């Protein structure tokens, strides 16, 4: 026991706090446990993380607070909350009573009390804790009771004080992981737009992540797959070559194999396909030192990149790029797409339901806008577009 506070309950809550730092969906349960331990569930708690000047950018967790009330607070009353401004002067890590943070004589004249709290019969008695105050963000915890009895604040003050060091560490961990997840998500989104199969490997050769194009290629089951967490080829010689390229890349990373220092463009080779179709073209390379350990690469531990190209796959026409770069009309884009994808002019006309004369006239307009001299030039121009998926 810590006074009249059960030690086992405190230890259980500490464990749950660190669990929530890693899995944010658990914060509501942590705050409910905090309210139960501190005030017998006769209170409410909010855990805010916000950027400077935006007091309710992100609510980490809430307990005993209706979502409509929270939305109302976030949309209007957060900007008028005197506790937000006053918390700038509160020492980080020290538990404070609400009436210490904002004196009653100040609160009595505020619209926040008279137009927000009182009409909703919400008490303004409680305790608060600033867990972080940095140049980019603020993190604060507020626990409010259901009545104005000051004597009932002693236990919440003690409970929050016991948990404060752990809440501060968890808030820091929560923020660091959130930034890593955001970097990973942005990098994943960028990879998924590439019109190229990309597989990122850890230094031991195991697959860390792959983009949508790589997933689609592997789903074809035409000679390349993942076995035991690693890329595998149905052709034994190609599998050995793949393993050797990865080993050479790993040697470059470790600086232990100076003979196999990575060539500028990595280690290329062909990967035969059981279907008899043209072999995949594979390139194994390492990330530059500038890229290692940041964003998604840092989260996944990725250090080696494998790109796989299918020579027989028709690349989608980069319609959005053509439209934005050369201001092609919808009719011009439709015809350009057919021609870039390999159709002859008469075939494209039939597919689009237009006359060959209209097709010739439209092609002439396309060539003028793109400054191309022929259909072949147009195809070369399209191939020079950035290699992104275009819907």
Image: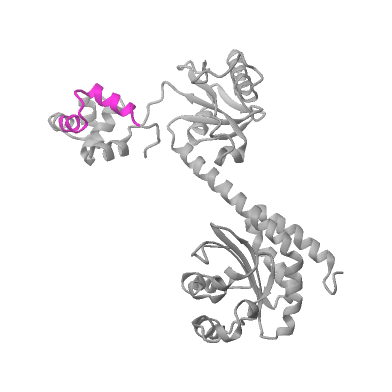
x, y (%) of residue 269? 52, 16
Q: Nearer the viewer, residue 78 or 130?
A: 130
The magenta segment is 364-385
Quadrant in which the C terminus appears: top left
Quadrant in which the N terminus appears: bottom right
Residue at the spot x=24%, y=23% of the render?
Answer: 377
Color theme of the render = one colour
x, y (%) of residue 288? 53, 29
Q: Quadrant of residue 333?
A: top left
Say if the magenta span includes residue 262: no
Name the magenta segment's main secondary structure: helix
Q: Is residue 47 left or right of residue 320?
A: right
Q: Nearer the viewer, residue 352 or 50?
A: 50
Residue at the spot x=42%, y=21% of the render?
Answer: 311
Instruction: Look at the image and tell me whether residue 175 can be seen.
Output: yes
Q: Quadrant of residue 284?
A: top right
x, y (%) of residue 300? 61, 38
Above or below, comparing residue 212 to residue 126 in the picture: above
């Amino acid at each position: 026991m810590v006074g009249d506070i059960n030690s086992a309950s405190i230890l259980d809550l500490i464990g749950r706090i660190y669990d929530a730092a890693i899995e944010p969906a658990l914060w509501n349960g942590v705050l409910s446990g905090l309210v139960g331990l501190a005030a017998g569930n006769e209170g409410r708690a909010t855990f805010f993380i916000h950027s400077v000047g935006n007091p309710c950018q992100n609510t980490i967790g809430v307990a005993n607070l209706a979502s409509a009330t929270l939305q109302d607070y976030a949309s209007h009353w957060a900007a008028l909350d005197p506790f937000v401004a006053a918390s700038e002067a509160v020492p980080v890590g020290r538990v404070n009573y609400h009436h210490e943070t904002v004196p009653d004589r100040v609160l009595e004249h505020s619209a926040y009390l008279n137009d927000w709290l009182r009409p909703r019969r919400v008490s303004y008695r409680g305790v608060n804790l600033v867990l972080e105050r940095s140049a980019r963000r603020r993190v604060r915890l507020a626990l409010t009771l259901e009545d104005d009895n000051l004597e009932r604040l002693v236990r919440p003050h003690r409970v929050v004080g016991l948990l404060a060091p752990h809440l501060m560490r968890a808030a820091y961990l929560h923020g660091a992981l959130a930034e890593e997840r955001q970097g990973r998500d942005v990098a994943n989104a960028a990879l998924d737009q590439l019109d190229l199969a990309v597989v990122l490997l850890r230094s031991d050769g195991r697959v860390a992540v792959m983009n949508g194009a790589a997933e689609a290629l592997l789903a074809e089951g035409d000679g390349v797959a993942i076995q035991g967490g690693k890329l595998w080829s149905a052709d034994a010689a190609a599998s050995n070559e793949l393993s050797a390229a990865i080993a050479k890349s790993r040697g470059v990373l470790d600086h232990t194999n100076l003979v196999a220092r990575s060539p500028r463009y990595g280690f290329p080779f062909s990967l035969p396909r059981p279907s008899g179709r043209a072999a995949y073209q594979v390139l194994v390379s390492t990330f530059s030192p500038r890229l290692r350990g940041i964003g998604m690469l840092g989260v996944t531990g990725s250090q080696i990149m494998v790109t796989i190209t299918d020579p027989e796959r028709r690349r989608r026409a980069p319609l959005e790029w053509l439209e934005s770069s050369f201001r092609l009309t919808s009719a011009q884009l439709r015809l350009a797409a057919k021609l870039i994808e390999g159709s002859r002019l008469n075939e494209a006309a039939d597919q689009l339901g237009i006359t060959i004369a209209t097709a010739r006239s439209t092609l002439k307009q396309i060539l003028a806008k793109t400054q191309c001299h022929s259909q072949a030039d147009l195809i070369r121009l399209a191939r020079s577009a950035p290699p992104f998926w275009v819907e």
